[in-house]
Image (cartoon, grey):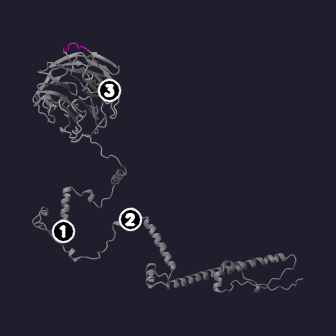
Amino acid sequence: MRSGAPRERLRFFSSPTMPPKRRSRTKPDRRAGARPGLKTQMKPDRRSRAGTGRPPREAAPSSQRIPPARPNAVAAALAVAAATAEEETRLRQRHRLTLEEDKPAVERCLEELVFGDVEADEDALLQRLRVARVQLHEDSDDSEVENEAKDNFSPQKKPVWVDEEDEDEEMVDMKNNRFRKDLMKNASESKLSKEKLQERLKEEFQHAMGGVPAWAETSKRKTSSDDESEEDEDDLLQRTGNFLSTSASLPRGILKMKNCQHANAERPTTAQISSVQFHPCAQVVMVAGLDNAFSLFQVDGKTNPKIQSIYLERFPIFKACFSVNGEQVLATSTHSKVLYVYDMLAGKLIPVHQVRGLKERIVRSFELSPDGSFLLINGIAGYSHLLSMKTKELIGSMKINGRVSASTFTSDSKKIYTYSGDGEVYVWDVNSRKCLNRFVDEGSLRGLSIATSRNGQYVACGSGCGVVNIYNQDSCLQETNPKPIKAIMNLVTGVTSLAFNPTTEILAIASETMKEAVRLVHLPSCTVFSNFPVVKKKNISHVHSMDFSPRGGYFALGNEKGKALMYRLHHYSDF
């Protein structure tokens, strides 16, 4: 049996006394407030468990009661935290002092200048660094205009050293210098300072340039157009290729061209090539010669494959020509009055044996009107016969003095130019067949060839002495003694062939009586291209026929060796 006398209770002090070092190593919250609270909470449990089997204990007197534990625990925790912080600060200062004893005095002075008096307060240093960081962030948020303004108004630094002689104003002699003499405005300006002379030179430059040039304006900001131009320049530098495009007009001097495969390479012959002509619509060339045949070839500049060959028995071809629409081929012989017409669509060869009213024993030279309506046959005894291209019937005849050497239509098919063997040129009206004008080709004693340009501007006359006179068509129609624009004298033998290119930028002239006697004349400068023909190769020989392709991309000529030479003119992109 337990006695009823109360047992002596254990007392827990709210603030136990421990050495400072001992307290710094322990956890303040568990030692200061956890255990007293736990004891006070367990006492009622013990009383509650003991109340069933044993008598209740008597309450202790008021003088022996334990004060409330929670306020004392909070105060103890705060006191322990303050003591710990103070101890850590003391240890940090002791450690810093230990490290600073080894530093030299210069380094300590530099740290004080940069970081301030760190000994006084480290928290102040940290606070100052935080403020600087926030200020830097705010400066970065400023507008671009403010930043540019700050850059423009940068503080000017003082010069480290000043030369006293530079401050003295030096005078420049203006009167005795021939270059500066013109800058004087009056006689009193015999000497000017360097600054005034610089201003005077600037004024003269601006007066000559008509103002301040764009590259001299330092304060000018770049606009969007400048940025776009810089981007274009960047794009230009980031790719490769041919940046030089060909000009719209053909330049004179050197003609860019190359040799191509012979047009009749797939049908070689040794007979003279009498006619070579390009098809007006298709990329086809026709070659005809004294071997009684004419052939059609596809033009590709490499192999030129043969399309078709038409053989005419005992009919050496003097001239062959496409019709304007490209559906027919007309051919005449050297000793026959028969005119052959080959229908390319039907594949039929139609001979025209006799033309009613035409009393010619031999039909050789003829011309077609540009509109495809008329056929002009050059007869003997000065006659020229005009036929209908559709029906091949005679419309009318025109007579000149002497012999007809050559004839041609104007580009509008309304007029005919006839060149006589005596060197006279006759201009006829097609509808009335009346002579509109007549003039003598300047310096010509024997006419051989004549041609008109497609734009209706020029008339070229080739004489027997090798001179080609180039006239203006308006002067040929209005004046009785027109003067040529230019006389081309690069040939020394009779000019038998003339041909304008489609753009009227090139005039081809040739003579069949001399080897390599062919030239290309640039218009309107009327100068000969220096790189054609190539004299060293000498592969052209005697030229009997010439022609340009419909858009000027190719140039072909036929010689007496049976070769139809062909050249590619690079200035013209199309066939």
Which residue range is magenta in the image? 353-359
State the quadrant of the N terminus: bottom right
Residue 287's label in the rendered image is none
The quadrant holding residue 286 is: top left
Disc 3 versus disc 1: nearer the observer: 3
CA neighbours of label 3 inside 10 A, class few (<14), some (14 to 19), many (20+): many
Per the image, the residue denoted by label 2 is: 147
The quadrant holding residue 332 is: top left
CA neighbours of label 1 inside 10 A, class few (<14), some (14 to 19), many (20+): few
The answer to which of marks 3 and 1 sits earlier in the sequence is 1
Give residue 571's position: percent from left, percent from top.
28, 39
Give residue 302's position: percent from left, percent from top.
34, 35
Residue at the outermost right position: 1
Residue at the outermost front position: 270
Q: Secondary structure beneath disc 3?
A: strand
Q: Secondary structure beneath disc 2?
A: helix
**Label 1 vs label 2: CA separation?**
36 Å
Per the image, the residue denoted by label 1 is: 194
Give residue 303's position: percent from left, percent from top.
34, 33
What's under tag 3, amino acid-wise? Leu
> Is residue 331 visible in the rendered structure shown here?
yes
Q: Residue at x 17, y 66 (%)?
A: 197
Is residue 48 positioned above or below 546 on the image?
A: below
Residue at the outermost top position: 356
Per the image, the residue denoted by label 3 is: 296
Nearer the observer, 46 or 370: 370
Disc 1 versus disc 2: nearer the observer: 1
